[in-house]
Image (tube, rainbow, N blue to C red):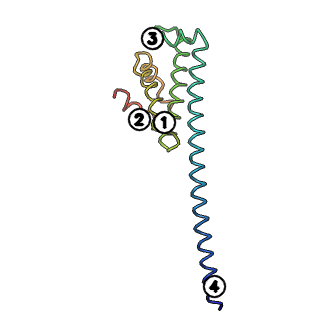
Amino acid sequence: MNWEAIGAIGELVGSLAVVITIAYLVIQVRQSNKSAKSVSTNQSRAAAVEVISAISSNTQAVKTYTQGMDDRKSLEIHERVRFDLIIYQMAKVTETIFLEYNSGNLSKEVWEAQWRGMKRILQSKGGRESWVQNKLLVSETYMNWADKHLDD
């Protein structure tokens, strides 16, 4: 066997090694993306559940929330602040889910479920008033998207 044949075999083996390495890296990246999406979905759900739990476990918060949804202006100032903070917290969770969905880290199904819930809140009389008063506290991207789709 001459040196040219050995060199050609070496190049072939090297090329094959590169192809195998690239294929392995593609598989690893896909698994990493899948894992990141799973983590993002779980964190998003946990954040939404945390907000709901904080409201539902406190009788006064439930009263403030339900009264505020019907008529925010009927709340006393301290209750209105509490109501606005509840709506703000829900808006921030929804904003995070929206941004995660837009970056490809969450499924459309998770995003749409969250938006349906938030939309229902923001379409209530008190929810809309709170949104109008405090929407500048979320990202401009989410604020504009929500305003555009709120009445769809």
Badge 4 crowding class, 10 Å Cα cut-off, few under 14, some 14 to 19, many 20 or more, is few
Q: How many marks?
A: 4
Q: Residue at x 56, y 52 (%)?
A: 30
Whole-percent x, y for residue 23 in the image: 57, 62
Q: Nearer the viewer, residue 29 or 116?
A: 29
Q: Are marks 1 and 2 in contact (CB under 8 Å)?
A: yes
Q: Mark 3 Cα within 10 Å, few/some/many (few <14, many 20+)?
A: some
Label 1, on which residue? 98
Distance of label 4 from label 3 (alpha carbons): 83 Å
In the rendered structure, which disc, 2 or 4, sits on the residue that comes first in sequence?
A: 4
Front of the two marks 2 and 4: 4
Disc nearest the viewer among 3 and 1:
1
Marker disc for residue 145 = 2
Q: Which numbered disc, 3 or 1, marks the residue that appears first in the sequence?
A: 3
Task: Please state, as top left, top right, bottom left or bottom right, where the N terminus lies in the image.
Answer: bottom right
Tell me the number on the disc at residue 7. 4
Say which of marks 1 and 2 sits in front. Answer: 1
Q: Which residue is mark 3?
A: 73
The mark that comes first in sequence, 1 or 2, is 1
In the image, residue 63 lies at what x, y percent?
53, 8
Separation (CA) of disc 1 from disc 2: 9 Å
Amino acid found under the numbered disc labelled 3: Lys
Task: Mark 4 or mark 1: name the one nearer the start of the chain.
Answer: 4
Mark 1 crowdedness (10 Å alpha carbons): few <14, some 14-19, many ≥20? many
Considering every residue shown, the one lying at the far left of the view is 152
Which residue type does callout 2 highlight? Trp
Which of disc 3 and disc 4 is earlier in sequence? Answer: 4
